[in-house]
Image (tube, rainbow, N blue to C red):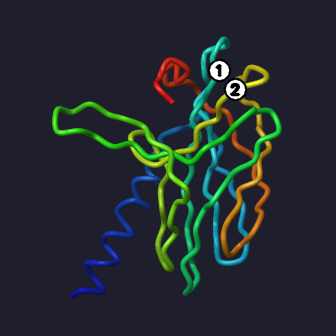
Amino acid sequence: MYIHSSLNCVKAPLLALCAALALATSVQAHGVTAGDLEIIHPNILAPVASAKSAAGYMGIANEGTTADRLIGIEVPSVKHSELHTTEHSADGVARMMHVDAIEIPAGETVLLERGGMHIMFMGLTEPMVEGQMVPATLIFEQAGRVEVEFSVDPSDGVDHSAMGH
């Protein structure tokens, strides 16, 4: 029973990610495999042209037997990148906060998504436009440096530069 419940916890977010990717017909899913880790569709929702920041999302599946941690990201076209989480207060106000690392448990998939954990790209040095691929390096505690490309996907209409980061 415990194993079955545990699998359902892993399946639900993975199924949600798959469903979201299937519905996004204009977006091509892409990813990278590095050892036991699979980086699933790293993406940025196209910010407004004048934006100074943007948010990055992806799924990270760990098929191994050892946990790993995402501890950093480097992006040549951005002055500063941080790992963030979103916390909701009792009155419903969302607040984004820097975190030092994102845990990737063995045998699980972690989603970096709107309203949860994500990557903040701050100090954009050039506009990010829909269809563009943005090279980056994810830094993991165990897997090391993993080269990825974030696809700039259709905008959600939110200007992240106005948020208190």
User: What amino acid is found at the position of numbered circle 2 in the picture?
Assistant: Gly
- Height in image: 142 above or below 138? below
Q: Are marks 1 and 2 in contact (CB under 8 Å)?
A: yes
Q: Earlier in the sequence, mark 1 or mark 2?
A: 1
* Residue 15 in picture, x, y percent from top left: 41, 59
Q: Is residue 49 left or right of residue 109?
A: right
Q: Which mark is residue 123?
A: 2
Q: Residue at x 64, y 71 (%)?
A: 37
Query: Which structural element holds mark 2?
Result: strand
Query: Which structural element holds mark 1?
Result: loop
Q: Residue furthest right?
A: 76
Q: Residue at x 42, y 37 (%)?
A: 96
Examine the image and state in which quarter residue 12 appears. Answer: bottom left
Q: Residue at x 72, y 25 (%)?
A: 124
Label 1 and label 2: CA atoms lie apart by: 5 Å
Q: Residue furthest left?
A: 91
- Height in image: 79 above or below 48? below
Q: Residue at x 48, y 62 (%)?
A: 110
Q: Nearer the viewer, residue 55 or 165?
A: 165
Which quarter of the rendering shows the N terminus?
A: bottom left
Q: Which mark is residue 52?
A: 1
Q: Nearer the viewer, residue 114 or 162?
A: 162
Q: Which mark is residue 1?
A: none
User: What amino acid is found at the position of numbered circle 1 in the picture?
Assistant: Lys
- Height in image: 102 above or below 132? below
